[in-house]
Amino acid sequence: DKSEEVKRTCCLIVDNMCKLVEDPAEVLPLMPRLEPLVKSATEKISDPEARGMADRAYNTLKKAAGDAVLQRVTAEEAMKQMKE
């Protein structure tokens, strides 16, 4: 199936890109969008080889994010920090 091959290729790209990340905080902004898509691929792809690639990408994505926590900073907080 062409769709599964595209999903497999996308998972391969995610897997390779996550391996290049040194700081887990760099992955966090992407997690809300990527994690559900890759997780869905691990559950819905019927081709065993493509599903294995999705599993590998999902595990690499989680490992790249590590224990980092995304923190939002308001403009006021940023200005306060800059003044200090």
Image (cartoon, rainbow, N blue to C red):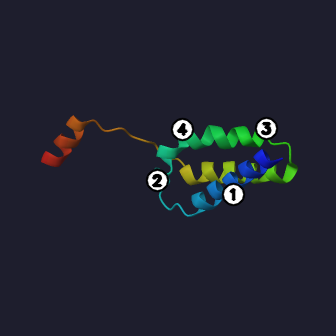
Q: Is residue 84 visible?
A: no
Disc 1, SS: helix
* Disc 1 from disc 3: Cα separation: 16 Å
Q: Residue at x 55, y 40 (%)?
A: 33
Q: Nearer the viewer, mark 3 or mark 4?
A: 3
Mark 1 / mark 3, whichever is N-terminal? 1
Three-letter residue code for mark 3: Lys
Three-letter residue code for mark 2: Glu
* Disc 2 from disc 3: Cα separation: 28 Å
Give the answer, above or below, for where 46 lies relative to 17: above
Q: Is residue 67 visible?
A: yes
The residue beneath circle 2 is 26
Residue placed most toward the observer, 84 or 30: 30
The residue beneath circle 1 is 12
Q: Residue at x 68, y 52 (%)?
A: 11
Residue placed most toward the observer, 59 or 43: 43
Mark 4 / mark 1, whichever is N-terminal? 1
Mark 2 / mark 3, whichever is N-terminal? 2
The residue beneath circle 4 is 32
Neighbourhood count class around disc 4 (C-alpha, 10 Å): few under 14, some 14–19, many 20 upward: few
Q: Number of numbered discs present?
A: 4
Classify residue 80 as left or right of residue 21.
Answer: left
Mark 1 / mark 2, whichever is N-terminal? 1
